[in-house]
Image (tube, rainbow, N blue to C red):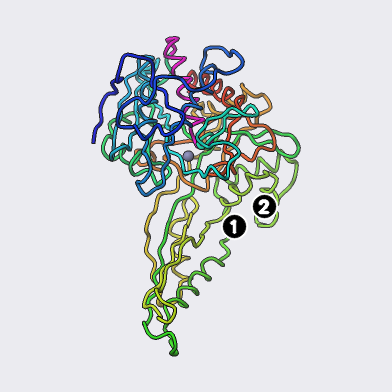
Amino acid sequence: MTSGRYQPASSGPVPRPASRGAADTRDDGPVSTEPTHAAPSEDPPADGRDEVVGICQDLIRIPSVNRGDGSGPGERAAAEYVAGLLAEVGLQPEVFESAPGRASVVARWEGADPGRDGLLVHGHTDVVPADAADWKVDPFSGELLDDCVWGRGAVDMKDMDAMVLAVVRARVRAGRPPARPVVLAFTADEEAGSALGAGYLVDHHRDLFDGCTEGISEVGGFSVTLDNDRRLYLVQSAEKGIAWLRLKATGVAGHGSMIQRDNAVSTLARAVTALAGHRWPLTLTPTVRELLTSLADLLEVTVDFDDEEAVRALVARLGPLSRMVGATLTHTLNPTMLQAGYKANVVPAQATATLDGRFLPGGERDFLDTVDRLLPPGVVRETIHSDVAVEEPWTEQLGSGGLVDTMIACLTDADPEATVLPYTMSGGTDGKVFSRLGIASYGFAPLQLPPGLDFSGMFHGIDERVPVDALRFGVGVLDSFFDRA
Ligand SMILES: [Zn+2]
């Protein structure tokens, strides 16, 4: 394992990725010294808006694919690239490798008031795989098309990585420190549970985050245009918890031609049917209730929050985002894998199923108790992976002058039409890991998106892309955020 302060491999320009296959040479340091991206067509001011598009393209061209089984190229090339950008302006990034090729970057950026609590700004550099055959463009091309940057990671989350890098570089060059100390972390392995990225840093180098009390990262701060043209910005202030479960049914093995009453396969099938068919009761957490109450106000409708059908009809007015928000009204549990048997005429002694459970903040015990109650005799449950749910109070913080007020102010200054509301994420992010250090992490990657763009559908989806204007909007918001946070 290697880690340490980043040393540029040469005194030449910042390493830039080759257009494809950059990770194949990841151990040899910088993969190319030639910028490969086209210069943006206009000439935006040098406050980060000039660089953000090129950096986003460069990052997409580094295929830091994480398949979750260690077969990918790793994040080393992306880490070298990020460290190079930070070192070039005078910060002192350190690269940490948790396993060969699995590299994260951390840098401190001194605040105007060094005595204040630190702010963690974190983004992962890995991406999920993409099958080029399904895409309109090469998913690792970073192509500019229809005023968007296209490619795997364009919204998850090389967009935010690029916005942060562009703003930080512009501010460091201009001698404009953030209001409070900032720790920048670009992590590996978020797409496979964070163990080799944020998890490794928190377990082995927790001093890096000393003094940090709050953080910002992905999947929040983006706009949603309602059917009455009102524009919302949803900041992520809560995440559901994760409970990946394995069910094991045990029976009596025997010949498939005989009467076999104690059949593990049919017992397991009953268990899976019972769990998959369970209707989880509507449970509105404080964050969801805040979102839905404000949404009803904006839409000028009255909704009975005890009536699930009415609540779901309200959520549907969020358009494509209703799939994510709809999954935060209850616990959820989906069967995802089944294994049993090895021959058509042999009844196996054991059958197993894997289920992806997501529980609401505060609801882990209730969720697991319900699962256990639904299981038929002869089936045992084990947890194969679990992670906490998090929920930061929102309403309570309004008007306190804290980070929530700052995020709202930055968005409403940039977009006077904005209404900023909290939401709960149905999935998980590195924010869960950093919550172990007591850091309150928010999804705040500001993007003003055109109406009708299925933003949440592009996460891990095909034709992932981010509008150039949205990136530049985000740079402006983050720039003012660093002044005011
Ligand atoms: Zn992500």
Q: Label 2's element?
A: helix
Residue depicted at x 57% and y 22%? 472
Residue depicted at x 41% and y 27%? 119
Magenta region: which residues? Answer: 155-176
Residue at mark 1:
282
Asked which quadrant contains residue 183, the reply is top left
Could you tell whether 380 is left or right of 4 in the image?
A: right
Asked which quadrant contains residue 382, the reply is bottom left
Give x and y (percent) for residue 342: 39, 73
Q: In this view, does 94 lie above or below 376?
A: above
Categorize mark 1 by other alpha carbons within 10 Å: few (<14), some (14-19), many (20+).
some
Q: In this view, does 154 lie above or below 108?
A: below
Q: How far apart are marks 2 and 1 (CA)?
A: 9 Å
Q: Is residue 151 magenta?
A: no
Give x and y (percent) for residue 227: 74, 39
Residue situated in front as seen by the camera: 260 or 324: 260
Q: Magenta: predominant secondary structure element?
A: helix
Callout 2 amino acid = Val
Give x and y (percent) for residue 32: 39, 23
